[in-house]
Amino acid sequence: MSTTAAIHPPADFAAGARISSRAAYDELRRLALADPEAFWSARARAGLHWFTPFETVLNWQPPFAEWFTGGTLNACTNCVDRHLTGSRRNKAAIIWEGENFEQRILTYQELHRRVCKLANVLLGLGYKKGDRAIIYLPMIPEAAVAMLACARLGIIHSVVFAGFSSEALRTRMDDLEAQLVITADAGRRRGKEVPLKKNVDAALEHCPGIRHSIVYRHTGAAVEMREGRDLDWTELMRGSAESCPAEPVPSEHPLYVLYTSGTTGKPKGVVHSTAGYLLQTQSTMEWVFDLREEDVYWCTADIGWVTGHSYIIYGPLAAGATTLMYEGAPDWPEPDRFWRLIEKYRVNLFYTSPTAIRSFIRQGNAYPERHDLSSLRLLGSVGEPINPAAWNWYHAIIGGSRCPIVDTWWQTETGAILLSPVPGAVATKPGSATLPLPGIDADVVNLKGEPVPDGEQGYLILRTPWPSMLRGLYRDPERYQESYWSRYPGRYFTGDAARRDADGYYWVLGRVDDVINVSGHRMSTMEVESVMVRHPAVAEAAAVGRPDELKGQALVVFATIKGGTAPTSALAHELRAWVATEIGSFARPEEVRLVEGLPKTRSGKIMRRLLRELVTTREVKGDTTTIEDYSVLLKLSGEGKDEEELLLGKPAAS
Ligand code: 7RM
């Protein structure tokens, strides 16, 4: 693996880059590792706007970290106000294109005006620092305005991906004990409407703590407005004042909570701070994307995921970038939509996912070849391992063999990119996220926590805290400790397997827990299983990931059904739809297999490993009506496995 040919940074790219040689990069990394506090402290002082300077750089009481304590600042001031005094005032902050080709451009000044107006609306409704707001909006500029208005007042926001169901929305509102929800009438996806307000209405049946919903009229879809509770965004904004002082908050004040899948059925509310988070998202805009003043930068993620938070909103705006936001699907109305957007807006920096790249490959080169992509200077990838074939295609066809590719590894929990090439300095190898960024102390270890030799597989860990790390799970310190810090006390366990080659390059292989990654969307197999067993026909369920050429992994669910119910393909179909309704359509299983029994250990634990093997190595042909023979699993569990694990439970009586 170490012999993989490295691709050196193109000379002209390196010449203009912030960090322009391997030596400069090594020196930066050396400085950061030698004295992390001095390194981050200098960056925080110079890079952020403070109302009160901080006194202490780091207070590390494992597993709880506090960065830059004593200081006060505001995330919105850092993302908006501080760009208003110079030439950035009339620079485009957000360029938005709707699915129907509508276009809106918000300069920093205009963004500021709208954010202040909305903040005044929120103040007028009685919301204040520490309150919690759910944001359930499509990919429209109002989503950024809503996030920033909350941040301006110290209101903790939680964006819920607009593809989530009302049930998923409700559990998040509940867990957060939110008081406010900001939504729209509907969103647009491939020419169809997503009924957001209707979903909110259903969720609010069970959420008495929510005092108001503010509704932005986006598509004009008919909605019910409940007197006293539901308020029209545009009407509220009309009479609102255009200036609103930002609330100084302590460095550690939570900026947002973002729910992500863990290894149990209940999503985890990942808490991010203000100062450390902003510092590292902003720093990585410079290190990883090598952002220049005149760039048009486009990250294709959705604001409902962490990539949208860190690399559409907070990182780019803190860095004073022009960030492009596109509302719709990549293949709408035709598979060349992304390339059309790049050509139209002369995009320079483009950041997308391996799944998207693989689907472009399938559609054929004619689509990108129809467009002038010569504005591109750098390409990025995130969300899952990128296979070398996809990497090479991206490099040649989209990047014209001229653009460096940054394969960025990070997580909802890490807040910002931690492993990635620095494009003017570090040679790339297709499929490797290359090296840790400055200030990041990564390692690959075995079960006992000992570093494994180069080339061997182990677990990816982080040995020291970093500014944008999660500060905890919302109101659940035990689960925080247990999920990330119990396996290797004092060190952060990522949940990923990795290998490091002889050049020190990291190859992240994927999750080792019950989290699966479908098209870069994190899903918990336990969450899917708990939804399945809520269906009246289902007795037991086991969800596993199957390798998928396009999506990375596809979701396959095995289920036993209760006596008296017929295992028909109609039922299997209904169960797929059930999961989609309960979680969101992105979670619809690729396949539901109705089986007679699930393989279990003596202690009754479902052996997902066997099922994973079954779906990976042996494609059992036939439609979903075929009840798998119990002996198939028995046979499969075959040689070389440990006794205890091999013991299969009795099939469920049916
Ligand atoms: C940003 C994001 C995190 C999980 C992570 C990995 C996988 C992400 C890469 C990657 C290999 C990459 N947040 N992952 N990026 N694997 N190479 N460049 O995706 O919380 O939703 O997912 O995604 O398994 O643990 S996330």
Image: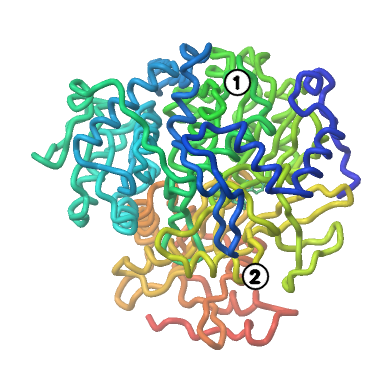
Q: Gap in Å between the C-alphas at discs 2 and 1?
A: 50 Å
Task: Give the percent coordinates (x, y) of residue 466.
Answer: 63, 50
Total numbered circles: 2
Task: Give the percent coordinates (x, y) of residue 642.
Answer: 69, 83
Nearer the viewer's eye, disc 2 or disc 1? Answer: 2
The reply to whether residue 612 is in sight is: yes
Query: The C terminus appears in which quarter of the rendering?
Result: bottom left
Element carrying mark 2: loop
Residue nearest the observer in this picture, 72 or 501? 72
Decide: is 506 above or below 495.
above
* Residue at left offset 34%, top offset 75%: 562
Decide: is 609 above or below 163.
below
Q: Amino acid at mark 2?
A: Pro
Left or right, residue 71 beside residue 123 = right
Colour option used: rainbow
Hey, which residue is sitting farthest right in the picture? 3
Task: Give the percent coordinates (x, y) of residue 174.
Answer: 29, 57
Q: Which mark is residue 410?
A: none
Q: Where is mark 2, residue-wise? A: 489
Graded by Cα atoms within 10 Å as few (under 14), some (14 to 19) or many (20 or more), the crowding at tag 2 reads some
Residue nearest the observer in this picture, 456 or 70? 70
Under 8 Å from ligand 1: the CB of mark 1?
Answer: no
Q: Where is mark 1, residue-wise? A: 367
> Going from the N terminus, do you reach mark 2 or mark 1 first?
1
Q: Amino acid at mark 1?
A: Tyr
* Residue at left offset 64%, top offset 20%: 292
Element carrying mark 1: helix
The reply to whether residue 359 is in sight is: no
Contact (Cβ within 8 Å) of mark 2 with mark 1: no
Graded by Cα atoms within 10 Å as few (under 14), some (14 to 19) or many (20 or more), the crowding at tag 1 reads some
Task: Give the percent coordinates (x, y) of residue 511.
Answer: 63, 58
